[in-house]
Image: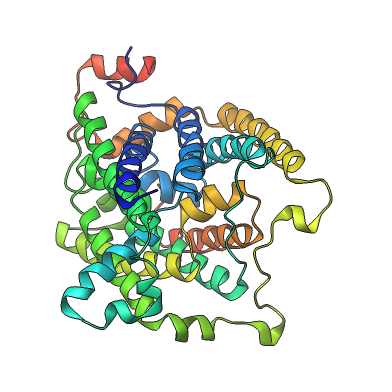
Amino acid sequence: MSILSGVVIGLLMGVVFGFAFEKSRMMEPGSLIGQFQFRRFIMMKMLFAAVATSLVVLAVLHGSGMVQLSVKPALIGNMVVGGLLLGVGIVMTGSCPGTAAAQIGAGYKDAWATVLGGLIGAAIYGYNQAAIDKALDWSGIGLGNLGKVTLVDLVPGGFVAWALGIAALLVVAMYFLEQAFPWRGEIAADEKDTAASAPKNSRSTGRIARA
Amino acid sequence: MNPLVSRAWSPYAAGVLIGLLQIPAFLLAGTALGVSSSFVTVAASLLSFVDSTALAIPYFKSHVSSAKDWWQVALMGGIVIGAFVSVRLAGTKRPAMSAFWPRVAGIQSFGQRFALGLAGGIVLLLGARIANGCTTGHGLSGLSQLAVSSFIAVTAIFVGGIVASMFLKKV
């Protein structure tokens, strides 16, 4: 992949991504923070659907040997501290790195602050990477780097069986989530926050109902 | 009805679509879906204008050299375009900031919201770079590769988010 073809492929994939983030309302602050309060489930539903699909895709592509996995090393200190900060950052911004781009496209002006702050955060880490990673290396207490391990390395069964099994479990979980929290109701609740400028005619509700 | 002009999609349909993006990601870009390292690529490129030594730092240097880096920056740009076209086609309009903020966080003005968003953005990307991935890289791609690193990171993201969200009113 050349840089030019990479950019073209990235743009096309991004457009699909952006549509999905906006139409599903996953990019709304209420979806992300509401998930952490277990009062909205759009994020979990979308994540489960995306992970289940992705598991099936990788069961085929990786199971057939067409592609190698791209697993990140399990540096425990980095995962724990980075993850905690990321969770706090999601609540402060009402966004995550990908949805910040969708918020900008959808017209939220405050998302520019998230992206600007994000660039500063990335710069701070880049300048201090060695020191930060050294401080978060917990090998001294036996919690160092586990390496690029996957579940499959720890338990018998193989990737394809685990991937398809977990995908099936996620489908069951989505069924029960939908019974408890129907998605149309969640979208309607979400529109409270954008109602100030949402079209008020009945056609718009009709569109949601038929979407 | 044409799904491109409808105002909302089910989160399941949107999730399946995003999951299918792993196919071009692995087959064409040769990597899993991710977005947060694009912040390093852009930050490092901008810094190089004011700090001539920035690109000598190995971490910055390793994020500006390959086609994958610019693929990911383009992915972010594409997300902006996709969301923009999506709201245009559907006629959805959004205010400068979501009414969520005054209602749930007691934010009084756009300035306050901007300040919180800026501080939050720093925390967000500092966390994502320390963890080497965000909700996309760990939450979607990592979990679907059954990566141990991502199970740890996603658990930590939820713990951080749940605790922080306790400081806000109920959504």
Residue at the spot 33% in from the left edge and 58% down from the top edge: A93
Between residue B51 and residue A22, name the one nearer to us. B51
Residue B96: x %, y % from top left:
16, 47
Q: Is residue A80 above or below residue B107?
A: below
Residue A173: x %, y % from top left:
65, 35
Image mark count: 0
Say which quarter of the image contains residue A54. Answer: top right
Name the residue at the top extreme: B1
Say which quarter of the image contains residue B107. Answer: bottom left
Between residue A29 and residue A77, name the one nearer to us. A77
Q: Is residue B94 above or below residue B160?
A: above
Residue at the spot 66% in from the left edge and 51% down from the top edge: B146
- Left/right placement of residue A79 relative to residue A192 reads right
Specify whether residue B158 is in view. Answer: yes
Residue A159: x %, y % from top left:
73, 45
Q: Is residue A25 above or below residue B67?
A: above
